[in-house]
Each structure stands twice: as C-alpha cells, then as structure tokens.
Image (cartoon, rainbow, N blue to C red):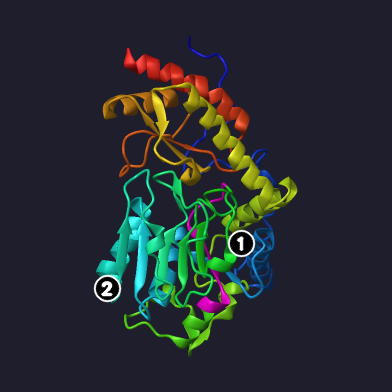
Amino acid sequence: MKPSEKPVNPNFSSGPCSKRPGYNVSQLSLDTLGRSHRSALGKATLKRACEDTAELLGLPEGYRVGVVPASDTGAMEMAMWSLLGQRPVDVFYWESFGKGWRADIEQQLKVDGARFFEAGYGELPDLSQANPAHDIVFTWNGTTSGVRVPDADWIAADREGLTLCDATSAVFAQPMDWDKLDVVTYSWQKVLGGEAAHGMLILSPRAVERLESYEPPWPMPKIFRLTKGGALIEGIFSGATINTPSMLCVADYLDALDWVRAEGGVSATIARCDANLAVIDRFVAANDWVSFLAESGDTRSNTSVCLSVDLPPEGVKAMVALLADEGVAYDIGAYRDAPPGLRIWCGATVEAADLETLMPWLTWAYNEIRE
C-alpha cells in the first residue's frame, strides 16, 4: 500500500546537502555583509572559521586550516599542484572523483614514478601497496560509490612521503587519524550542509615543510600559490583568503559549526551519521530486491549510501522520478558515472526519523515500477 506519512525533510541530495535541523537563514549573523573581507571584521570572521574548525576537529598542534576557492576540488588541486613532484606518488581510487585526481597527476602534472591502484565501484584497491617512501593521494570516503577506507592503519607512521586526502564527505562524519594525514580537503556543502564554492585546506607541519623547501617544476596559477619567496603565506590560514569569498557563505558555515558544537561536537555528528546508516542497513537486511553497492560492511559509507536495486537502469530512473514526484525524496539517483542505483545522503544534517519514514516509500515505488 502507498504510505501515508512523508518525511518532514525530503532533501537527500549528496551535494549540496540538506541544511541542519532547525536551520533558518534569517538567524545568520550578517554583520559582515557589504564589508570588505580584508577589513578587520572580515579577517576576524574568516579567522574564526579556521580556528573553530581546528578546535572542533581536534587537530594536532601545528596543523593549519585555510579557506580556499573552488570547493573541495579547488582545495585538492591546489594541494596537488603545490606539493607533488618531489617524490613518486601512489594514487588509490575507486570512484569518479579519485579517478579525476589520477587524471590530474598522470595527464597534467605528469609526476615521475606515479603508480595507480584502482578498484571498481563497491570495492577498495589493495591499500597495502602504499610505499612509505612515496607520496599518497586518496579519497577517504568515495562520495559516488559509498565506499570508504576503514581506517588509516595502512599508512605508515614513519612515512617519508606526504599523504594527500580528499575527505569531503568524511570530515565531521567519520573518525580521522590526523597524525597519518598531511593534507586534508573538504567542502562546506557536504556533512555540514553548508553552501558551495568554498573549500577547506588542512596542512600538517610536514606539508608546510614541503611547501617551503620544494618548488614544483610546472607553472603555478596565482589562485594555487601557497608560498611567497619560499615561505608559507600564513595569511591564508589566519583569515586573509587568496580571493574574495562570499561572506554570506562564511556566516552560513559558522552557523553550521555552532550547531556541531551545540550537538556535542564531532563525536555527536559521527553518531548521527552512524544512526542514519543503521536505518538503511535494517531496511536492506529485510528486502532482497535492494543491496549495498559497498560489498563490505567495514568499508560502507555512513554518509553517501549507495544502493543497487533489482530493476533495469530505466526502471531505477523511473523509481527515482516517482519518489521525487511524490515529494518524499529528492535527488537520490546514483551519480552519473556510477552503476545505476540509489544514492541516499545520510550525513549529520539528515534526521533518522526522515529516513525511517522514507523506507516504506522505497518499497512502494519499487513495486509500482516493477509492476
């Protein structure tokens, strides 16, 4: 039978993601609007974004946080262009965005000694192949595949190379072993439900040392430059951004960070994501027509949850469209490069109660299309 109750919030998009519970744009602090981002107020506000991020994530001493342009993609490409080339690099990828980092390294930067380790959607490559003498580039959580690394045990503590980690759908949702990570990037639009277009760049002291002692052999666009005269541009990590940011988006990000703090910190947002995944886990266990794309529970994402459905590709598309037409789930089709299926965002801003309400609708829509 067709369910009668609908989710209060039907937004399950994997980016931009649902705003936090209770969000009200009129409650944002807007004193920076119309002011220069270079003013004392503008710099102080951006500095707070960096400092609050470091505090909430519990970053080790000496780690730097900066706001950079072009979302997670901009942050990741800035890091690769600035840091890679001194050593061979091992690239591990198992979905579309990681494949894009390979393309940058192989076709644009053409790093000598680059090695590439690939796995199909639903799997992880052999992480044990990581060479401690090499730099490492990987995605912590594959947003388009729903597969994450289970931990950072495969990264050597006494490594000589740097680890560059795209963690855009993992930060604030999954435990991060910061001591194993030299560069971490993410965007506000994922787990925190913030606005798009801005990225976050986190650097370890080892990454800063590389920046100040190594100059890449390729031309460096101004928007990627992290050093001047061989020294780190410290202003990037204390409120002086490379280009003009949206101060409205910054206010929105600070609101999201305040919400994380009020919830109880990162441990609380991780718990919310785990509880959301548990709702879908129970549903999949009870229905043989749907399964997780991630083959192993240890590597299953608790944010970008990807499901395979026992329908032909056109049937899956019809199911997604039907749920949207009913106003119960928007934007839950698989990523365009991924196998046909559903992708339901289960990040911290999603309520478990809405997922509980959505599950019977999935069954109804499946039966409607199958018949």
Looking at the rendered image, the quarter that the C terminus falls into is top left
In the picture provided, is 114 more to the left or to the right than 224? left
For the magenta stretch, what is the residue range?
193-207
Across and down, in percent, residue 355 comes to 56, 29
Decide: is 277 above or below 36: above
In the picture provided, is 136 more to the left or to the right than 202? left
Q: Which amino acid does label 2 sit on?
A: Lys
Residue 32 sits in quarter: bottom right
In the picture provided, is 26 more to the left or to the right than 11? right
Q: Which amino acid does label 1 sit on?
A: Gly
The label number, if any, that marks residue 110 in the structure image: 2
Decide: is 122 above or below 320: below
Residue plotted at (28% across, 30% down): 313
Residue plotted at (56% across, 54% down): 171
Across and down, in percent, residue 56 comes to 68, 58
In the picture provided, is 364 more to the left or to the right than 204? left
Residue plotted at (34% across, 75% down): 88
Residue beneath label 1, please?
34
Q: Which of 92 and 322 is in front in this view?
A: 92
Residue 49 sits in quarter: bottom right
**The residue positioned farthest toward the bottom in the image shown:** 229
Whether residue 262 is visible:
yes
Decide: is 51 above or below 231: above
Q: Distance between the residues labelled 1 and 2?
A: 43 Å
Q: What element carries label 2?
A: loop
